[in-house]
Amino acid sequence: MADYLILCSGETERHVRAIADHIDQTLSAQRHPPLSMEGASTAQWILIDFGDIVAHVFRSDIRAHYGLEHLWADAKQVRLPAKFQAPALGPVPAAKPRTRRVRKQG
């Protein structure tokens, strides 16, 4: 059984996959490759097993549905220090309207 359980979430499948890829790449670069990874094909819930550490990366609605936090409600929670937390991102700017090109015939 893992000593540490990491639960995190992203808003979309692409975001979930990016978080999981970052965790994998960062630990693999430090010579700690995962023992296994499940769920990467759908990226709704990716489980990465590093032995002593297991990371669950959920799409936000899937995380709310399963509520794994309740299973380990008595476990000690550890907050990451601010230097390890990602900075808050501002709102995504609206895309500029596209102009349509019309080919002249003649």
Image (cartoon, rainbow, N blue to C red):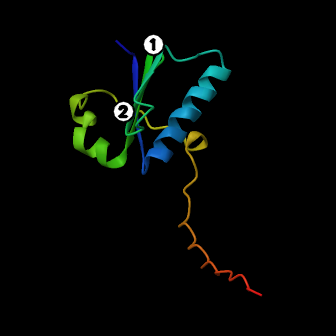
Q: Looking at the rendering, which quadrant does residue 25 occupy? A: top right
Q: Residue furthest right?
A: 106
Quadrant in which the N terminus is drawn: top left
Of pointers 1 and 2, the one earlier in the residue sequence: 1
**Where is mark 2, residue-wise?**
77
From the viewer's perspective, is residue 65 above or below residue 72? below
Percent from the top left, x then y, of residue 79? 45, 38
In what element is the residue under mark 1?
A: loop
Residue 51 is tagged as 1
For image coordinates 29% across by 26% down, the residue present is: 75
Q: Is residue 35 above or below residue 46?
A: above
Direction from residue 86 to residue 39 in the image, left or right: left
Q: Are dots 1 and 2 in contact, CB under 8 Å?
A: no
CA separation in Å, label 1 and label 2: 19 Å
Residue under the image location 64 percent in, 81 percent down:
100
Write the residue at 55% across / 64% down.
Answer: 90
**Residue that appears at 68% across and 80% down:** 101
Q: Is residue 100 left or right of residue 75?
A: right
Q: Of circles 1 and 2, which is in front?
A: 1
Query: For residue 94, which numbered disc appears in the image?
Result: none
Please provide percent x and percent y for residue 16. Answer: 46, 42
Amino acid type shown at disc 1 = Gly
